Image (cartoon, rainbow, N blue to C red):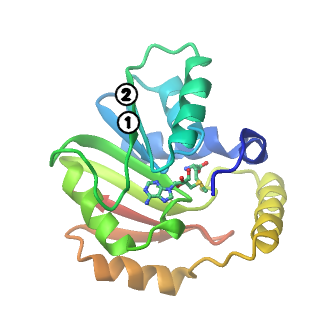
Amino acid sequence: MLRSNENYAELKPMYPLLIQQFVDDYDLMHGIALDIGAGPGWLGMELAKITNMKIVFLDISQGALDMAKENFEKLDVDNEVDYIQADVHELPMEDDRFDFIMSRGSIWFWKQPEKALKEIERILKPGGVAIVGGGLGRYLPPSMRARLQNRIRKGLKERMETRPNIEEFKKIVEKAGLINYKVLSEDEGGGRWVEIRK
Ligand SMILES: C[S@@+](CC[C@H](N)C(=O)[O-])C[C@H]1O[C@@H](n2cnc3c(N)ncnc32)[C@H](O)[C@@H]1O
């Protein structure tokens, strides 16, 4: 499942914009952030560049984490960092641990997304927020959005993958029995996210 740095590089202009959106929406600057299904680490890296947050990268794949570590070490930032190899369905952390949790493009691979969402809620600190789903965010200029969407569609077709539509996504989230959540969709581009608060 792990794709190379080159594949991710195709979407690279999107990551700083999505992180800027999260920072603006959730007023992020301090505390501990967790990137679930981090892959080569682009999201956590962008968050490190513009906040003082400690960044924890988590992935089921050790290969992905090795890549994230290699990429992060080249960044020359001062943020504390940690790498955890684990399955989102059974997170090896205590309750109420993280101020911010993000996960992009990973939920589509989870066998029991309802269980995983409940796990995410469990390790979120009271007052914290988690954002889980997939999409390009709201800040992309329209021409870039169209270009990146074409690349994603082409990639999905080549891999014969399908993703839940917004109605199917809502049903998955409802089943999780989260206490305080909102399903968000991006107007254009089919982004689907669940925002979890505690
Ligand atoms: C499409 S990549 C997304 C990478 C990154 N978040 C991004 O947006 O560029 C999905 C990642 O989720 C990870 N993953 C899949 N199932 C997982 C699970 N059960 N627990 C933790 N990570 C998982 C994969 O190993 C992969 O690195």
Residue at 49% across / 63% down in the picture?
133
Q: Quadrant of residue 12?
A: top right
> What label sits on residue 53 in the rendered view?
2
The residue lying toward the viewer, choosing from 136 and 6, is 6
> Percent x, y for residue 128?
25, 47
Residue drawn at x 60%, y 61% as measured from the top left: 135
Q: Position of residue 162 (x, y in %)?
A: 66, 78
The secondary element bearing badge 1 is classed as loop
Indicate the quadrant containing the C terminus: top left, top right, bottom left or bottom right.
Answer: bottom left
Identify the residue at horizontal 50%, vertical 86% (top origin).
167
Asked whether the viewer can see residue 14, the reply is: yes
Q: Of circles 2 and 1, which is in front?
A: 2
* C-alpha distance separating marks 2 and 1: 8 Å
**Mark 2: C-beta under 8 Å from nearest atom of ligand 1:** no
Which of the image's four quarters has the N terminus?
bottom right
10 Å crowding of disc 2: few (<14), some (14-19), many (20+): many
Q: Mark 2 or 1 closer to N-term?
A: 1
- Secondary structure at badge 2 equals loop
Above or below residue 21? Residue 148 is below
Whether residue 36 sits left or right of residue 21 in the image: it is left
| Residue topped by disc 1 | 28
* Residue 57, placed above or below residue 7: above
Task: Residue 119: give x, y in percent of width and height.
Answer: 26, 60
Relative to residue 93, is residue 158 drawn left or right? right
Q: Three-letter amino acid code at disc 2?
A: Met
**Contact, CB < 8 Å: mark 2 with mark 1?**
yes
Q: Residues within 10 Å of mark 1 (few under 14, many from 20)?
A: many
Report the amino acid beneath label 1: Leu
Residue at point 36%, 76% (across, down)? 173
Q: Is residue 197 visible?
A: no
